[in-house]
Image: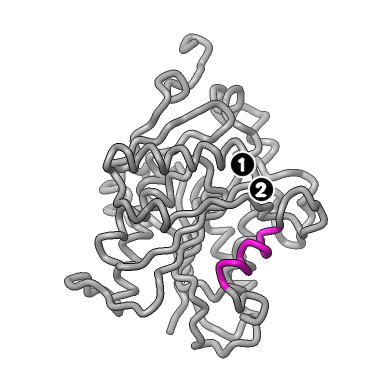
Amino acid sequence: MRSRGYPLQYILGDQPFGDLEILCRRGVLIPRPETESYTYQAAKLVREIALDRKDASKPPNKARPLRVIDLCTGTGCIPLLLHASLAPHFQQLEITGVDISPTALSLAQENLEHNLQLGQLASSASTDIRFHRADVLGNGNDNSVPSIESILKTQFPNFGALDTLPPDQESGCDLLISNPPYISQTEFRNGTTARSVRRFEPKLALVPPYSCSGIEDCMPEDIFYHRILTLAFKLKAKLTVLECGDSSQANRVVALHKRLASAESGKSSAEVWPSREKDLAENGFHVTDGSRSVIIQTLQ
């Protein structure tokens, strides 16, 4: 099987992700080391923001749970690692993973239970983490799959009224994070994408659907970012972390954020991470190519 390029993670059945053991199965995207790095960085920033900028020496005192949304959750690796990283610092956590694939959601729940049994997650993870099926790109016209708005309304009761809240009003969303499909149809076909990825990993998790393209000033492979940024503004998310395919795409997402932010009343900043050679080297990234993340922070 390996001679045909079949992924080793599917053969062995698991992949390390931080201290977690993430079960892997055909039909669900295999977690990458870069995603692990972005998840750790997101957890670090959440702690710093909660401690009022950069003082991580003592635990925060929050009256409400710290709320996290992970869109396109796949194996559930991001919610699980975030819980492992944040549970020692926060008494209350509400982490929601969302995916359109029932196969992915089933595996995500299995990974939650598996790592609880291994003792890699605090027992509170069994109630702190929830997985839901929803269509991130859909408009709710497909009755067979809930819209992402319907899920967000259950997590944030005033979601529909957030547009009318003052800029400094808390929405309750501390982190919106996503590793969405971001490969173009062309790059998927022309050999840019590794052969084993094309043949054996789910295209649904790699390439945005043609049917949802056509957004003005947005390349087809960037449509998930347009949608997620729109949701981030509606949620007034304190922190948004988006994995991108490379630095060029990350820079497009920063520009997209700038365009969308110009119509919003609040202020936020966006940056590509890692960008400095020091951060690239310390986190195992290539200097000139490879994936990047875009980190967006609401300015108080």
Residue located at (38% from left, 40% from top): 33
Which residues lie in the magenta part? Answer: 147-156
Three-letter residue code for mark 2: Glu
133 sits left or right of 126 in the view: right
41 sits left or right of 272 in the view: left
Q: Position of residue 59 (x, y in %)?
A: 23, 72
Residue located at (65% from left, 38% from top): 204
Q: Which residue is mark 2?
A: 221
Residue located at (38% from left, 59% from top): 42
| Residue at the bottom extreme of this rendering | 166
Towards the viewer: 55 or 99: 99
Residue located at (45% from left, 42% from top): 290
Residue 188 sits above or below residue 252 on the image: above
Count the marks: how many? 2
Label 2 secondary element: helix
Residue 248 visible in image: no
Q: Position of residue 255 (x, y in %)?
A: 58, 65
Q: Residues within 10 Å of mark 1 (few under 14, many from 20)?
A: many
Which of marks 1 and 2 precedes in the sequence? 1
Q: Position of residue 147 (x, y in %)?
A: 71, 58
Q: Mark 2 touching mark 1, by CB under 8 A?
A: yes
Three-letter residue code for mark 1: Ile
Q: Say which mark, if any, is on residue 132.
A: none
Residue 112 sits above or below residue 255 on the image: above
Q: Position of residue 262 (x, y in %)?
A: 62, 79
Q: Which residue is mark 1?
A: 183
Label 1 secondary element: loop
Towards the viewer: 148 or 32: 148
